[in-house]
Structures are given as C-alpha cells and as structure tokens.
Amino acid sequence: MEINRFTIRVYGLLLNENQELLLVHEKMPHLHFTKFPGGGMEFGEGTRDCLKREFMEETGLEVEIGDHIYTTDFFQPSAFKQGDQLMAIYYQVLLQNTNQTLSLEENTIYAGGKAETLRFFWKNINEISPEQDLTFPIDRIVARKFLSNFKQLSK
C-alpha cells in the first residue's frame, strides 16, 4: 500500500461526575464504529482548537482541553481513506460549564458533504472493555492507558 498523505485527528476523553466516559457510536454508509468524540484537524488549526471545535460541532458542549494523554507512535493506516496515514492525538477534556446538557438522541451531521449519524452515550469507567467497546486500535490503547492511570489514582 502506498501512503501519500497524513490525516491528523484529535480526540477527547470526558469523564463526568458519575465516573462515566463519553463515547460516540457513528454510522456512515459503509462503516459503523464506536470511538471517543473528536475529529479531523483543519489547516490553520492547532490540536486544542480542533478538539474544542469538534466537541462544539458534534455535542454542542463547550469544553476546556486538559492534559495530553497520548499521540500515535506507530504506523496506522486510515480506516477511511486508502493511502492515508493516521496520526491521532488524545487529550483529557473538561466541561467549561457543568450545567451544560448533552443530547443522547441520535443526530445526523454533515461533514465534508457526507452524512454521519452520531449517538453519544456514557459508559461507567469500571465497566469499559476496550476490546469490546471501542472499534479502533488506537482508541483501545488509549482506553487501556486511561483506565490504568485512573485505577492507580483511585487507590
């Protein structure tokens, strides 16, 4: 496979007061998957600004970007576009205002002229199974790392 382009995606891990992580199930015409909220970085945009924009576009939530959690450190071809190499960056995310509400109803957004159906849901951190709950390999690595750190801090 010839790789001729990079795709940079930025994701956020939002943990609520009930010890639940926010996940999103997305449906595209050719693919269904579950991942952390976030999306593609645009030209002229930094990673933190990208994540704020993506959260606002997808969830309607204003967020603050916290600590960096992980950046892909291995070759990962894109699941969406042949010839693209994916680089994914993950941050912890905090709500700017805890009175904000998130719709858990399915909604459709249009990105790049294509329709994507999103359904956000909360998953208790003690019940998350990275291999069963997340579709993509990088998300699974990040989930294991986050869960391990969370359990160490909880002791």
Image (spheres, rainbow, N blue to C red):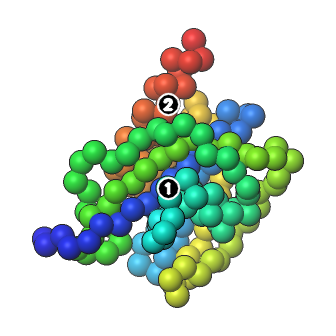
Question: Which one is in front, 130 or 6?
Answer: 6
Q: Residue at x 73, y 55 (%)?
A: 62
Q: Residue at x 30, y 67 (%)?
A: 6
Check residue 27 in the rendering and tell me which mark sits there, or answer none: none
Answer whether residue 85 is visible to the viewer in this image. yes
Q: Residue at x 68, y 42 (%)?
A: 94
Disc 1 vs disc 2: which is toward the camera? 1
**Marks 1 and 2 in Cβ contact (< 8 Å):** no
Residue type indicated by callout 1? Thr
Q: How many marks?
A: 2
Looking at the rendered structure, the secondary structure element under dot 1 is: helix
Check residue 47 in the rendering and tell me which mark sits there, or answer none: 1
Looking at the rendered structure, the secondary structure element under dot 2 is: helix
Residue 82 falls left or right of residue 150: left
Q: Residue extending furthest top?
A: 155
Residue type indicated by callout 2? Leu
Give the labeled residue for mark 2.
Answer: 147
